[in-house]
Image (spheres, rainbow, N blue to C red):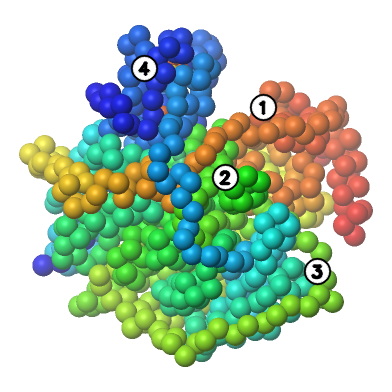
Amino acid sequence: MNNDTSFALRVLKERCTGCGLCADTCAYNAIKFADVPEIDSYACRLCGSCVQACPAGALQISEPETGKTAVPQEETKGIWVLAEVEDGCLAPVARELLGKAVVLSEKLHHDVEAVLIGGNVSACASELIAYGARRVRIVEHESLAAFIEENYACELVRLVRECRPEILLVGATPRGRGLSARMAALLQTGLTADCTELDIDSDTGLLLQIRPAFGGNLMATIKTPAHRPQMASVRPGVMKASEPDYSRSGEVVYADVSKVSSDRRIRLIRETVEASCGDSLENSRIVVGIGRGVKSLDMVNRIREWAARFGAVVAGSRAAVEAGLIDAHMQVGQTGHAISPDLYIAIGISGQIQHTAALAGAKKIIAINPDRTAPIFGIADYGWAVSAEEALSQLTAGGL
Amino acid sequence: MKRYIVFLKQVPRSTRVEIDPVTKTLKRSSALTQTNPDDLHALQAALDLRQNTGAEVVAVSMGPASAEAVLREALQYGADRAVLLSSPAFAGSDTWCTSLVLASAVRRIGDYDILFFGRMAIDGDTAQVGPEVAGQLDIPQVTCLSSIHEVKGNWLVADKKAGSLLQRVEIETPCAVMVSRENGELACPTLSGWRRAQRQEVIRWDEGDLQLDGKVVGLYASPTKVVSTDVPQTAKEIRWLSSGSSVAEIIDKCVDSLS
Ligand SMILES: Cc1cc2nc3c(=O)[nH]c(=O)nc-3n(C[C@H](O)[C@H](O)[C@H](O)COP(=O)(O)OP(=O)(O)OC[C@H]3O[C@@H](n4cnc5c(N)ncnc54)[C@H](O)[C@@H]3O)c2cc1C
Ligand code: SF4
Ligand code: SF4
C-alpha cells in the first residue's frame, strides 16, 4: 500500500462518507477499504472512474502545478484534415471531417486545410474545396502510389513540421489508425482515438476531444494543452458532411517532393483490393440491428427476410456477434462499424455505449426491447417495449 | 541469436460496472483482471515463429504489481523471460508516454528482431500503442498482420490488411507487428510449461532501471489530458409505440423519402 501524498489521486478524508462506492467501481482493484479508502498508487491507473462514482466529491485527481497552462512556443496555424483517398476516390470520412473542421473554424478562426497524399491524388482537390477546405496541400509522388505507412508518415510529418498546423484530424479507418499513431509518435504529440464529438473550448481555444471512455458508461473529454498539433481521430459515419458547394474557391498548394524517398526496409511484393462487405453496411440507408434479445438463428433468418422487404441490411451488436448470430464484419459498435443510416431499427439490443457510440450519425432510431429501462431507449426516437419474439410475429404478420 | 519481445497488458475482465439485480449493489466482479485477449495471440504468433527460428521470447508488461499474473501466464505458455515495468510514476500515462516506457524497455533488453503487440487493448481501446512504439524506435510496422509467411535472414515476409487493402510485404527486422484475435487459435499451456514457469522469476524494472526521468512519463507528462468524464446525455424525447403497424408506418415513410 502506498499513501504517497504526491500521487495525483487524492482522498479528501473530511468529505468521505465511507460509502465504499469508489472501491466497488475501481476495475483495477486499486482502492483498499478500511474506514476511508486508501489508494494503491502502484495499482491505480488514474482512469477517473472512482472520481466520477463518488457521491461526496471526496476524490480528486489533481492537475499538475506546472505544464497545465504551458502553451506551445511556436506559432501554429490551420485546422487540417488528412483526406484519405481510396482507389482514386475520396473516402467519405474526409468529407465528414471537413464538415466538422468548418464548424470548428468558426470558433477558432483558423483556416480549414486538407492534405492529400499519394501517387495520383490531385483530382480530389476540387471536391475537398467544395466540402469546405480553404487550402488543399498535395503531396504527390510516384513512390507514394502504394500505401506504405512508413513512407506516408515520413512525408506527412515533414509537412506538419514545416507548416505547423494547430489541429490535425484523421479518419479512424484501417489505414488512418496505424498511420496517425506513427505520426503522433514521430511528432511527439498526443492523439485521441475515436472521438464522437469535437469542439473548441471557449476559454483556452483548445480542441475538446470527446470519446466514449473506459467503463463504457462515460464520455471523456480530452485536451492536448501543450503539444502540437492537437491530433484526433474520428470513425467514419460519426460526423456529418456539409452540402458541397462547387462554386467555392480555394487554393491548391503542391508540397515539395524533391526529398521523397521510399523506405528501403519495406518492399511491397503484391497488393490486392478486396471488395469489402462492410461498405454495404456503412452506406445503407436502413439498418436493422440485432442484439442478444434475439434468441435464435431461426429468428435472425426471419428478421433477414423481413428486412429484405424494405431493402434494409441486417447488422448486430457485439453481444450478437459473440452469440454467433451475426458475422463479425457486420458488427456495429466501438470495435465494429460506425454507421449513419436514415433509419436504424434495434431489436433486442440493450444499448451499451460501445454500441450506441457508433450510431451518433443515425437520423431516426426505433428501439424494440421488453425492458423499458434499457439504455437503448435513451437514444431512440421511437420505443416499443416488447420482446423480439412478439415484435417479430407482429411485424411479419402484416405484409409490409 | 534472435529475440522476440511480446507486449501484454493486464485489463479488467469486464469493462462494464454491473449492478447485481438481487442486492442492487455494484458487482465486485468488475475488479477481476485478465490478459488482454489480442495480446495472447501476439504471444502465440511469437511462439509459433520461434519453432522455426529458435528465437528467445521475452514477455513485457507495464502495470501494477498484479500485472505479474499476466507475465506468469506468458511464461506458462512458453515465454523464456518476463519483465514487469512497474512504478507509480507510470500511472496515468497516455499512449505516447506508455510507448515511451515500452520503447525504453526495448532498448534496455536490446538486440531484438521482432516486437509483437496486440492490435488493441479492450480497456483503453485506442490501438495506438504498437504503432507509436514503432514510431518512437523508428522501425517498420505491420499494423494489421494477417499472417507471417517466413523469415528470410533479416527479412520478414508477411501479409497485412488495412480494410479492403491486402498487401504482402517484405520487411527488414527489427520491426513491429500488431496481432489480433482474428489471427487464429491459441495453443494451451502445457504441464511442463506450467512447471517451468513456477521456477522462473519475473524481472521488475522502474523508471530508474529504464534510465527515464520520472517526470517525462505518467499523468503529468502525457500530451493528452482527460479533463472530465460525464455520463452521456440522453436528452432525446422518445415516442412510445404500441404495435407492429406503427413500426411499419415509420419504415414506409422512410422508404418513401428515400425513393
Ligand atoms: C478515459 C480514458 C480515455 C483515454 N483516451 C486516450 C486517447 O484517446 N489517447 C491516448 O493517447 N490515450 C488515452 N488514454 C490512455 C490509454 O488508455 C493508456 O495510454 C493505455 O496505457 C494504453 O492505451 P490502450 O489501452 O488504448 O492500448 P492499445 O493501444 O489499444 O494497445 C495495443 C497493444 O499495445 C500493448 N500495450 C498497451 N499497453 C500496454 C502495457 N501497459 N503493457 C504492455 N503492453 C501494452 C499491448 O500489446 C496491446 O494489445 C485514455 C485513458 C482513459 C482513462
Ligand atoms: S482512478 Fe481508476 S484505477 Fe485509480 S483508483 Fe480510481 S477507479 Fe481505480
Ligand atoms: S465513494 Fe467517495 S464517499 Fe464513498 S467511500 Fe469512496 S471516497 Fe468516500
Compared to residue B78, the image places residue A366 above or below, namely above
Cα gap from disc 2 to disc 4, whole angstroms: 29 Å
Identify the disc placed on residue A244.
3
Percent across and percent down for residue A296 are: 62, 37
Q: Are marks 2 and 1 on the same chain?
A: yes
Name the element at disc 4: strand
Identify the disc placed on residue B163.
none
Amino acid under disc 1 = Ala
Q: Which residue is mark 4?
A: A37
Cα gap from disc 3 to disc 4, whole angstroms: 56 Å
Which badge, 2 or 4, is on the more N-terminal residue?
4
Q: Residue at x 76, y 26 (%)?
A: A385
The chain identifier of the residue carrying mark 1 reads A
The chain identifier of the residue carrying mark 4 reads A
Compared to residue A208, the image places residue A109 above or below, namely below
Cα gap from disc 2 to disc 1, whole angstroms: 22 Å
Cα gap from disc 2 to disc 3, whole angstroms: 27 Å
Cα gap from disc 4 to disc 1, whole angstroms: 32 Å
Q: Nearer the viewer, residue A148 or A63?
A: A63
Q: Which residue is mark 2?
A: A211
Q: Nearer the viewer, residue A103 or A29?
A: A103
Which badge, 2 or 3, is on the more N-terminal residue?
2
